[in-house]
Amino acid sequence: MTKSAELPPLSNTLVDPFGRKVDYLRLSVTDRCNLRCTYCMAEDMTFLPRQQILSLEELRDVASAFVELGVRKIRLTGGEPLIRRDIIKLVSAISALPFLDEVTMTTNGMLLPKMAQPLKDAGMNRLNISVDSLRPDRFKALTRLGDLDVWHKGIRAAKTANFTKLKLNAVILSGFNDDEVLDLARYAIDNQMDITFIEEMPLGEISSHKRVNTQITSQALRDQLETEFELTDSVETTGGPSRYVRVAGSDSKIGFISPMSNNFCDSCNRVRMTAEGRLLLCLGNEQSMDLRAVMRSHPGDSALLRSKIVQALQDKPERHEFDPNRTDIVRFMNMTGG
Ligand code: SAM
Ligand code: SF4
C-alpha cells in the first residue's frame, strides 16, 4: 500500500485551468554539472552565483509545500544533482515527508561509484541514469568530459546497492548516435533495466550542431527496435511523459518521450522548480513564479508559500509548441531541470 492511501482530502488542490491534476514535481537542486553534453549545454557556460541557488532548507520547504498540496512524486534533477553538496541530507529529508510516495533522481552516473549506496540508504528506491552511447570515444564526444569506464562503475555500484528499479535515459541524435539504439536497448535488457529514448528538444542555443539536422522521431527508433525485438504497447506509466512498450521474453520496458513528434501535454501532471527557485509551469513555455522571492521575503510562512503555488498553477499553459528550427526557449535543459 502506498503512503497516499491514508491521505487527507487535500489532494485535489493542484488542478490547473485545463482540469489536469499536478502530482509530480521535478526539483532542480543545481544548474551546475560535471559534464557538458552537447545537446544540453553550450561548451562555455555561465552558472548561477551560489547565493541565488535555493538553500537545502528552502528546497526542503518547497518539497514539503508541494507534498501538502497533493504532490506524490518528486524527482531531483539539475544540472547534475549528485554534485550538490549535502544532497544525501536532502534526499533523507524529502523521503521522510509524510504522504510522499516516491523520491527519485535523474543523474549522469559519474558520481554513483561512491554515492549509490548512500542514496539508497537515504530512502531513494529508483534511479534514472543517462547514457547516450556505449562507445568510449563517442561517450566522451557527446558529454565533452565524461568517461564511460566511470559510468560503468556507477552502474555496478547502483546494482550492488539494490535499487528497486534502474532506468536508462538516452537522447538520440540523428547522425550522432542513432546507430546505437539497438545496442542501448540490448544493454538495458541484458542488465534487467528499463530504457527510455528521448527526442531532442530545442532548449538553449548550442554551437555543436544544428538541432534541425539531428531530429529523429520516436517512431523511427521504434521501427529500428522492431527489427530485433517483439514490442507490445503497454498502458504502464511511471507518472512521467514516457509511453512504454513491453519487450517479449524480458522484464524490461522500453519508453519513448516524444516532445517533438507526439505532444503529450493533454496528460501533463507535472511542474518544475529551477535551482534558483523559479516555479516553471511548462517545459516549453516561460510562465513561472519566483518562489525564492516568496520564501526569502516571508521566511517560514508555509501557508503563503502554498497559496502562491496554487495561484501559479492557474498560469499553466495548455501545451508546448517546439520548432527545431528555432530556439524560442533560451533556457538550457540544465536550468530547466530534466
Ligand atoms: N545531469 C543529469 C542527467 O544528465 O541525467 C540530470 C539533468 S539532465 C538535464 C536530465 C535529462 O535531460 C537527461 O536525461 C538528458 O539527457 C536530458 N536532456 C538534456 N538536454 C536535453 C534536450 N535538449 N532535449 C532532450 N533531452 C535533454
Ligand atoms: Fe549535465 Fe545532464 Fe546536461 Fe549532460 S544532460 S550536461 S549530464 S545536466
Image (spheres, grey):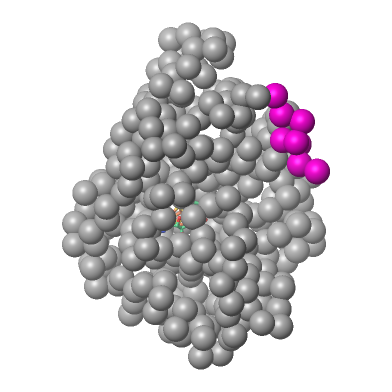
Image quadrant containing the N terminus: top right
Provide residue 140's location: percent of width, then percent of height: 46, 70
The magenta segment: 1-8
Provide residue 217's location: percent of width, then percent of height: 36, 72
Provide residue 87's location: percent of width, then percent of height: 63, 38
Q: Check the image and report above or below for 77 versus 62.
A: below
Name which residue lies at 61% across and 81% down.
186
Relative to the observer, which residue lies in front, 130 or 262?
A: 262
| Image quarter of residue 23 | top right
Confirm whether residue 255 shows in the render: yes
Name which residue lies at 33% across and 62% down.
260
Which quadrant of the figure shows ligand 2? bottom left
Q: Check the image and report above or below for 54 versus 134.
A: above
Confirm whether residue 63 shows in the render: no
Relative to the observer, which residue lies in front, 210 or 151?
A: 210
Residue extending furthest toward the bottom: 227
Q: Is residue 63 left or right of residue 170?
A: right
| Image quarter of residue 318 | top left
Check if residue 2 falls in the magenta segment.
yes
Check if residue 13 falls in the magenta segment.
no
Q: Check the image and report above or below for 280 versus 239.
A: above
Name which residue lies at 23% across and 59% down.
323
